[in-house]
């Protein structure tokens, strides 16, 4: 039973704890009417089925936690489930706030019913890597589950949709200024891709300490109107008096208010301590937090609450502060070096003072407020803290706690040279490498610190840290670590040095430093004494890869052939297959379809005979196969191989090629006219690219998003995507810069700037020969230039581009090539009112039909319909327009379907001939996206 603390002189607040309890359990909050109105509105929106996000921001102690508590109470009162978790300072455990909020609840969820509702058991199995409650319910099977962040984010989204489907869910996440990078990324994903169920996500944090990823995500969402923001400021003097239970003009109340700066937590702490004399220092309301987030007067007031505790209770409180915001009695006993019964008795005493509170009816407790825990933790001597963290780490290890839980204590207590501590940190890092690479990088760095001078003898740990940093998108740091690792290798470690050089080159081209990447590789190739032939093949293949990325297709073929010779010399079948796949793509982009097909046939024979366990290390080969098949027009096999790569990525946690896999799939689907599916994959490509930290995959993903937007009629949106992408891209010419530049040209044409289109497309192609574009796609871009020249009434220039398009067609190339050349000729003829336009357009439609490219077939039929009507073949023209409309409608290109209908209506009514100009969207493939150029007659 709690005992009263006694009435403060001159103050009606008999027990300050009552104020804290009242404000945190749903009773009226003082001075927050406007903020509560925002929260009520968000709850109403959630009940109406609209997912939403509310951010609650303010300085320490300003009332964020209380407001989240009030939100939860109001949500429960309306029938929604309300769950809350918080991030903890110094704790690097991945996704800690989500785990705290959801894990206990997951133990009561009927997942058997969820399976019948269509939810994927595989998605829930992925979650078992982070949520302990799911480990037993969704066992991993014979192979461990390795969740990659992209797939994990989607699994959490599926989980939240599941939990909120019946009556709605409010998920409150507090103290996000301490959040780990993984949690910030997950929140970013959920804000941009909200669950399609009644879910309200409430996020509380200190804005001046917010992680950059979280701040950027919420700022972006705020400008788009997808986040409601609640900013908490100081209480007014009247509200402060109400909180103290005193008159506004009471002298002590005034001193307390001035000392607290109107901060409610500070005000309560000072009130509890009996402070308020004239010497109480003032805390300006707008002052920045001190290093430990608590003004000295407030910390002293909080520590004063410990003054009346017994010695055992004080030690147990300090032990609890070492363990975190929440803790269990057994671990408190371990850290405090006392028996569990004594620890429970001590916690009773501490709870009576309202410093900690029991969580439900469990053996777990939580500090009244994170700032209380901070004051206790910071009030303990540094030496005692170190030993306490040691006992915590040992106790958790004896209990079989996850390595991630042990690591936070190990890093704060281990001595330099402690091999066991190094082992814990290294294994913890490896455990979370794919799901939380930033945490893995941090723990590996701590392991290297503990090794001291001996770290120079562990180059594999430097490589582990570089891998983790690279996966986290921190490419510059990764590159620097790789340089350090290279300096640590002994001279005789030639094989290791070659592999490390490939990793360094990969990091350089990811950073857009293609020349530096090639120079690294060539220097290593020149120093060939004692190097295994297998490593020579890897170096040569990487040179070919960089050449492909810089659109130097002849060089890519040359180095690919050298790599194949080296690989065949040693006879490694997996390496031979990988190099042949690269060479098949290089031949395709260089325009040699025959040699490409020869290489591809051998690759497919090998891959189709390889089981999934061996393919795990060859996801990049599946990517090159998918791109090659797409360029050759083999769409169904391309989707099959890309789908296999996506499945392996999901199951193994490999993420390097995810953006490529999604983007290639999006392009194939777009060629096939499946725009809705293409849009989904294009968004997935952008999401995957956002986790990589490199401009290259981001540019690739943005190009396909722009292409899909154009086909769907959002020309302004496509233009914005291209301009924003180029503003972040480097100046060095690359295949990916050509892609987005070409898309920009297409978007400029569709937005009424044909001159800008010509300028940008020629720049993207590296000049009028278009050699920077992939050979299979050159007729597409040349046909776009025909439309642009017609848009500025230069028929002669259009005819020249049409001639170049015809010359760019390869006899053994994909059938779509011929379609673009024929369509370019038809549009140029139509501008001259030449009767040959109709025949050329019909032939183009047939070629696109054979190529299974319905959007372009529809484009050609639209041109054919206009051309036929112009030579008094109205019935044939109307039939072509009807077919064009049906194809556009079936693909989801609504704006173009409407255009075909308008032309059908005009010609059917016998209206006069219109000026011959039609603008349609464009497409390319790997640097190549769809590209309608300008056809005759329509101007948007």
Image (cartoon, rainbow, N blue to C red):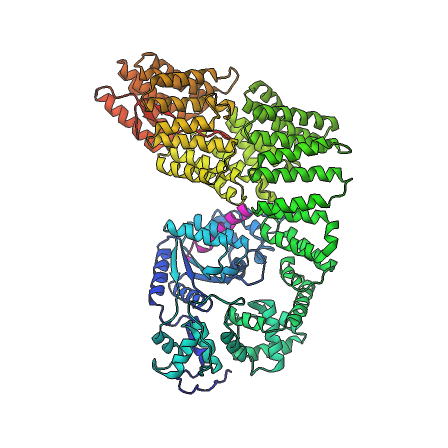
Choose top left, top right, bottom left or bottom right for residue 41. bottom left
Choose top left, top right, bottom left or bottom right for residue 557. top right
Looking at the image, residue 416 lies above or below residue 709: below
Report whether residue 883 is seen. Answer: no
**Residue 218 falls inside the magenta stretch:** no
**Residue 156 falls inside the magenta stretch:** yes
Looking at the image, residue 512 lies above or below residue 406: above
**Direction from residue 398 to residue 910 in the image, left or right:** left
Residue situated in front as seen by the camera: 728 or 8 = 728
Coordinates of residue 780 in the picture (x, y in percent): 44, 23
Helix, strand or loop: magenta stretch: helix
Coordinates of residue 461 in the picture (x, y in percent): 69, 49
Instruction: Give the total of numbered labels.
Output: 0
Coordinates of residue 678 in the picture (x, y in percent): 45, 35
Residue situated in front as seen by the camera: 768 or 43 = 768
**Direction from residue 250 to residue 149 in the image, left or right:** right
Q: Residue at left 35%, top 55%? A: 48
Please provide the residue range marked out in magenta: 149-168
Q: Residue at left 42%, top 87%? A: 9
The C terminus - image quarter: top left
Choose top left, top right, bottom left or bottom right for residue 506. top right
Residue situated in front as seen by the camera: 655 or 516 = 516
Report whether residue 594 is seen. Answer: yes
**Direction from residue 676 to residue 474 in the image, left or right:** right
Looking at the image, residue 532 lies above or below residue 191: above
Coordinates of residue 716 in the picture (x, y in percent): 35, 37
């Amino acid at each position: 039973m709690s005992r009263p603390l006694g009435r403060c002189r001159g103050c009606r607040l008999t027990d300050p704890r009552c104020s804290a309890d009242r404000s945190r359990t749903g009773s009226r909050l003082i001075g927050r009417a406007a903020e509560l109105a925002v929260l009520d509105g968000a709850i109403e929106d959630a009940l109406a089925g609209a997912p939403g996000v509310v951010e609650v921001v303010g300085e320490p102690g300003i009332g964020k936690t209380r407001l989240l508590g009030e939100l939860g109470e109001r949500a429960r009162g309306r029938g929604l489930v309300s769950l809350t978790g918080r991030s903890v300072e110094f704790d690097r455990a991945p996704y800690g706030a989500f785990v705290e909020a959801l894990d206990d609840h997951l133990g009561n969820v009927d997942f058997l019913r969820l399976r019948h509702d269509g939810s994927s058991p595989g998605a829930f199995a992925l979650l078992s890597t982070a949520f302990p409650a799911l480990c037993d319910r969704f066992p991993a099977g014979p192979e461990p589950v390795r969740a990659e962040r992209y797939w994990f984010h989607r699994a959490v989204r599926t989980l939240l949709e599941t939990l909120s489907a019946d009556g709605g869910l409010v998920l409150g996440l507090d103290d996000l200024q301490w959040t780990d990078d993984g949690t910030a990324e997950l929140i970013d994903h959920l804000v941009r891709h909200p669950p399609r169920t009644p879910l309200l996500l409430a996020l509380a944090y200190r804005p001046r300490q917010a992680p950059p990823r979280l701040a950027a995500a919420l700022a972006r969402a705020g400008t788009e109107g997808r986040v409601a923001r609640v900013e908490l400021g100081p209480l007014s003097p009247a509200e402060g008096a109400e909180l103290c239970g005193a008159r506004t003009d009471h002298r002590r109340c005034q001193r307390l208010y001035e000392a607290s700066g109107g901060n409610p937590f500070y005000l309560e702490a000072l009130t509890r301590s009996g402070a308020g004399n004239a010497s109480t220092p003032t805390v300006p309301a707008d002052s920045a937090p001190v290093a430990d987030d608590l003004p000295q007067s407030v910390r002293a007031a909080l520590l004063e609450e410990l003054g009346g505790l017994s010695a055992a209770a004080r030690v147990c409180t300090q032990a609890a502060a070492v363990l975190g915001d929440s803790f269990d009695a057994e671990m408190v006993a371990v850290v405090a070096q006392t028996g569990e019964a004594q620890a429970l008795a001590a916690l009773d005493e501490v709870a009576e003072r309202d410093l900690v509170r029991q969580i439900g009816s469990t053996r777990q407790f939580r500090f009244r407020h994170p700032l209380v825990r901070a004051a206790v933790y910071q009030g303990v001597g540094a030496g005692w803290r170190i030993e306490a963290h040691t006992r915590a780490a040992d106790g958790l290890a004896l209990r079989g706690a996850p390595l991630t839980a042990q690591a936070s204590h190990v890093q704060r207590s281990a001595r330099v040279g402690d091999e066991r501590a190094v082992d814990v940190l290294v294994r913890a890092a490896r455990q979370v490498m794919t799901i939380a690479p930033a945490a893995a990088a941090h723990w590996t760095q701590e392991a290297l610190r503990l090794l001291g001078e001996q770290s120079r003898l562990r180059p594999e740990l430097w490589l582990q840290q570089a891998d983790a940093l690279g996966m986290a998108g921190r490419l510059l740091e990764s590159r620097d670590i790789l340089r350090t690792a290279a300096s640590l290798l002994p001279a005789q470690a030639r094989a290791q040095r070659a592999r490390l050089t490939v990793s360094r080159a990969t990091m350089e081209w990811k950073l857009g430093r293609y020349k530096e990447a090639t120079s690294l590789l060539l220097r290593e190739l020149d120093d060939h004494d004692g190097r295994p032939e297998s490593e020579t093949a890897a170096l040569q293949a990487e040179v070919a890869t960089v050449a492909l990325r810089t659109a130097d297709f002849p060089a890519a073929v040359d180095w690919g052939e050298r790599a194949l010779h080296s690989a065949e010399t040693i006879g490694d079948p997996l390496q031979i297959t990988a190099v042949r796949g690269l060479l098949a793509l290089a031949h395709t982009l260089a325009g040699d379809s025959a040699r490409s097909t020869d290489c591809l046939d051998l690759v497919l024979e090998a891959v189709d005979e390889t089981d999934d366990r061996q393919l795990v290390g060859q996801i990049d080969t599946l990517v090159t196969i998918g791109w090659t098949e797409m360029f050759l027009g083999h769409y169904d096999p391309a989707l099959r191989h890309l789908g296999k790569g996506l499945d392996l990525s999901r199951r193994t946690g490999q993420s390097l090629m995810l953006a490529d896999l999604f983007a290639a799939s999006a392009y194939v689907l777009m060629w096939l006219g499946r725009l809705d599916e293409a849009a989904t994959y294009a968004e997935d490509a952008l999401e995957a690219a956002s986790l990589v930290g490199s401009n290259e995959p981001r540019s690739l993903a943005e190009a396909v998003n722009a292409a899909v937007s154009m086909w769907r009629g959002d020309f302004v949106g496509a233009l914005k995507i291209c301009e924003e992408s180029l503003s972040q891209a480097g100046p060095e010419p690359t295949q990916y810069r050509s892609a987005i530049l070409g898309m920009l040209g297409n978007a400029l044409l569709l937005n009424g700037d044909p001159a800008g289109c010509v300028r940008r497309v020629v720049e993207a192609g590296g000049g009028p020969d278009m050699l920077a574009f992939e050979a299979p796609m050159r007729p597409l871009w040349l046909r776009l230039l025909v439309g642009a020249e017609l848009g500025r009434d230069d028929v002669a220039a259009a005819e020249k581009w049409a001639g170049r398009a015809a010359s760019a067609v390869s006899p053994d190339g994909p059938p779509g090539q011929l379609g673009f050349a024929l369509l370019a000729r038809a549009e140029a003829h139509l501008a001259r009112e030449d009767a040959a336009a109709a025949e050329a357009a019909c032939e183009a439609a047939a070629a696109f039909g054979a190529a299974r490219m319905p959007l372009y077939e529809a484009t050609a039929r639209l041109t054919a319909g206009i051309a036929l009507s112009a030579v008094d073949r109205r019935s044939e023209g109307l039939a072509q327009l009807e077919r064009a409309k049906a194809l556009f409608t079936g693909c989801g290109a609504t704006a173009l379907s409407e255009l075909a209908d308008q032309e059908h209506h005009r010609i059917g009514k016998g209206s006069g001939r219109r000026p011959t100009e039609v603008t349609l969207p464009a497409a390319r493939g790997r640097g190549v996206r769809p590209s309608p150029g300008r056809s005759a007659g329509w101007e948007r």
